[in-house]
Image (cartoon, rainbow, N blue to C red):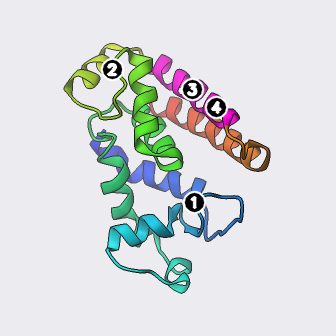
Amino acid sequence: MKENFGHCLDMLLRHEGSFVDHPRDPGGMTNLGVTLATYEEFVNRDVTEDEMRNLTPEDVAPVYKQKYWDKIWGDELPSGIDWSVFDWAVNSGPGRSVKALQRIVGSSPDGAIGPKTLEKVYEADVHDVIKKMHSARQEFYESLRTFDTFGIGWTRRNKETLDQALEMV
């Protein structure tokens, strides 16, 4: 829902935390959940480590709006589903999150939301979709080779997202 972006962004930033550069994280240098590569692409220039360390929520909000929320059609999704799809999109890419949603609602999983997918979403039970998104996301995480390193955090985040999404309905 359009009015949910700010609330979802606040929850997302609590999940994402501050500056990290973990050697086993394929995303590399990250602050407030935005990787160096994503931020450089967004601002269309090279970015220093110091700039990355000093990113603010105001700096990253437009990144999240344009590259994630708008790509998942967050303004059009029902409350709760928007958060479920958005958080996973940020964590694993919009295409993966959208394809999972499309499979759950019985739409063609092409990774791009459009009128046909929205129609299927609107016909579905919101609680059921949110719970199935949680299950699909957990299954995906457990399939990753880095689950032994990051699995506890991913599982916690996925459960929090489930609980928060259900509260939004």
Secondary structure at numbered mark 2? loop
Of residues 41 and 31, the one nearer the viewer is 41
Q: Residues within 10 Å of mark 3 (few under 14, many from 20)?
A: some
**Residue farthest toward the left in the current orientation of the protein:** 115
- Mark 2 and 4 residues: CB-CB less than 8 Å, in contact? no
In percent of width and height, residue 92 lies at 52, 45
Q: Seen in the image, is 33 located left or right of residue 138?
A: left
- Which residue was labeled with disc 3? 136
Gap between marks 2 and 3 measured at Cα: 16 Å
Question: Which kind of residue does numbered mark 4 sit on?
Answer: Gln
Q: Which mark is residue 108?
A: 2
> Is 60 on the left-hand or right-hand side of 118?
right
Q: Is residue 100 magenta?
A: no
Q: Residue at x 28, y 43 (%)?
A: 2
Disc 1/disc 2 C-alpha distance (Å): 29 Å
For the residue carrying disc 4, how many other residues have a C-alpha within 10 Å: few (<14), some (14-19), or many (20+)?
Answer: some
How far, Cα to Cα, is label 1 from label 3?
Answer: 22 Å
Q: Which residue is mark 4?
A: 138
Image quadrant holding the C terminus, namely: top left
